[in-house]
Image (spheres, rainbow, N blue to C red):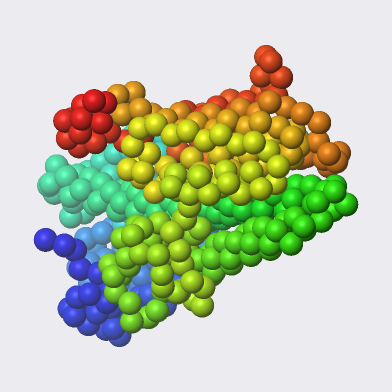
């Protein structure tokens, strides 16, 4: 059975709206704001009920021994029991020892006042505010005093053991209430700390998610813009060198440059458009096309059309577009050989995108640093038995026609980040015979049916 909470249970809401409940909440709020005011009221109340005994006559005055003491002694005793309560929270132990001493003295003299209630109040204060290790000493001091009360003051002295039992129960109840309030305060403080910690953790997760999204977008833009600009620069340099020898190739080079720039611009728009995309209000939460991710650059799936937020969405490139990628690089001058083995078209869209971007970045680096005269070999192998995809891009090196600008190293960093996100690794370095080599190993999910892997191997 679930516990009632405000706003969910009509009975609870009715009780919370009761004038008594509202008044109690206002008293609690005032006490938290000005605790000394409530302590002053408590001290005044105890003093008044003690002074009332001075004007009592008859059987009550003779029963509690009031007729044996002068009035000024009774008034002084009531004041000594009540006034220290003003500091019961700031100095609970000191107030307790003062009140206990006054009570013990008057009980030893054989009289009792209504202001003896202050002993129960200070017991509550000790259990509520004092260090818990002091409680055994407090209990050891209270027990002899209430024993004196049970044996010295009428009418308790007529049946002292019964009186001692009830006084011990009252003292225990006062201390238990203080401990219960102390535990409740500790629980509320723990809940507040936990709420603050969760809020900090939520903000940290948001900042980490934002940083991760920025890094992901940075990788996408670096791959898109970097590769296209490298191809355009290579084509422009080659076209400028051959303008005098073969002027008839000028229009073809310009056409390839325009197509490359147009394709890069379209891919850039799709990426940024997907990041800014907003799902329509009338779209159901589960109505998105499977394989499409709105809000990030990865948009893969069987549907190649559609527009969200004014940006037309297309599947992200995969292993099927590697041939086109190599053909585009050939137009810039390098000789590119591409081989594929295994069922690379059956890889998940995210893994295909990772393979495509790794090959794209490696080809961009080869064109940028080795120049258009290099020979590049690209191989992609999907090994179902080893459950991994191996990607390798080797170039023969060479002298670039123009001196490339000093790189920042973001390309290799992006390669390693992509491989790490896919659960794999990338190694890059110079080849023994000259040139540069990039090798990546990415894990691939195994097919649900083991016979598929055996059939693929055959």
Query: Left or right of 400: which side holds 317?
Result: left
Query: Left or right of 162: which side holds 62?
Result: right
Count of numbered circles in the view: 0
Give the camera-side residue of 96 and 271.
271
Q: Given the current orientation, which residue lies at the most extreme top position?
A: 432
- For the question of whether residue 205 can be seen, the reply is no
User: Residue at 52% across / 53% down in the picture?
Assistant: 209
- For the question of whether residue 360 can be seen, the reply is yes
Q: Is residue 105 above or below residue 334?
A: below
User: Residue at 21% across / 26% down in the picture?
Assistant: 454
Query: Picture coordinates of residue 211 (x, y %)?
Result: 59, 51
Q: In which quadrant will I find the C terminus?
A: top left
User: Residue at 19% across / 75% down in the picture?
Assistant: 9
Give the quadrant of residue 333. top right
Query: Picture coordinates of residue 98 (x, y %)?
Result: 48, 48
Query: Picture coordinates of residue 373 (x, y %)?
Result: 74, 35
User: Residue at 64% across / 43% down in the picture?
Assistant: 330
Q: In which quadrant will I find the N terminus?
A: bottom left
Query: Left or right of 369: which side holds 338?
Result: left
Q: Is residue 312 above or below residue 447?
A: below
Give the camera-side residue of 182 and 259.
259
Give the camera-side residue of 154 and 17.
17
Query: Picture coordinates of residue 122 (x, y %)?
Result: 40, 53
Give the camera-side residue of 68 and 153.
153
Query: Left or right of 369: which side holds 66?
Result: left
């Amino acid at each position: 059975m679930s516990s009632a909470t405000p706003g969910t249970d009509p009975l609870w809401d009715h009780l919370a709206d009761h004038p008594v409940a509202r008044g109690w909440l206002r008293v609690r709020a005032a006490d938290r704001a000005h605790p000394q005011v409530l302590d002053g009221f408590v001290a005044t109340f105890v003093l008044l009920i003690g002074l009332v005994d001075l004007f009592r006559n008859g059987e009550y005055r003779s029963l509690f021994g009031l007729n044996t003491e002068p009035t000024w002694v009774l008034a002084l005793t009531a004041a000594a029991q009540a006034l220290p309560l003003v500091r019961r929270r700031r100095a609970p132990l000191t107030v307790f020892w003062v009140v206990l001493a006054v009570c013990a003295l008057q009980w030893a003299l054989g009289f009792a006042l209504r202001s003896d209630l202050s002993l129960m109040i200070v017991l509550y204060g000790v259990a509520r505010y004092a260090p818990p290790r002091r409680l055994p000493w407090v209990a050891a001091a209270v027990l002899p005093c209430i024993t004196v009360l049970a044996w010295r003051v009428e009418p308790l002295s007529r049946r002292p053991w019964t009186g001692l039992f009830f006084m011990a129960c009252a003292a225990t109840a006062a201390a238990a209430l203080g401990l219960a309030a102390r535990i409740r305060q500790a629980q509320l403080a723990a809940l507040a700390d936990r709420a603050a910690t969760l809020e900090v953790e939520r903000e940290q997760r948001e900042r980490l998610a934002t940083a991760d999204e920025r890094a992901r977008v940075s990788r996408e833009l670096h791959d898109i813009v970097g590769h296209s600009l490298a191809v355009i620069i290579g084509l422009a340099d080659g076209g400028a060198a051959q303008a005098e020898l073969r002027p008839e190739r000028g229009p073809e080079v310009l056409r390839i440059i325009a197509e490359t720039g147009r394709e890069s611009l379209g891919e850039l728009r799709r990426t940024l458009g997907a990041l800014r995309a907003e799902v329509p209000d009338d779209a159901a939460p589960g109505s998105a096309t499977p394989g499409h991710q709105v809000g990030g650059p990865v948009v893969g799936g069987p549907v190649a059309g559609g527009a969200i937020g004014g940006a037309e969405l297309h599947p992200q490139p995969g292993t099927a577009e590697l041939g086109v990628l190599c053909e585009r690089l050939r137009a810039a001058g390098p000789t590119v050989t591409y081989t594929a083995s295994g069922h690379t078209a059956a890889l998940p869209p995210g893994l295909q995108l990772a393979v495509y971007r790794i090959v794209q970045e490696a080809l961009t680096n080869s064109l940028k640093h080795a120049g258009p005269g290099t020979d590049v070999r690209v191989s992609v192998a999907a090994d179902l038995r080893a459950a991994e995809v191996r990607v390798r891009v080797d170039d023969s090196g060479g002298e670039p026609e123009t001196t490339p600008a000093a790189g920042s190293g973001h390309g290799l960093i992006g390669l390693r980040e992509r491989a790490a996100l896919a659960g794999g690794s990338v190694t890059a370095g110079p080849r023994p015979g000259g040139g540069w080599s990039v090798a990546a190993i990415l894990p691939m999910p195994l097919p649900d049916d083991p016979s598929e892997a055996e059939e693929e191997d055959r």
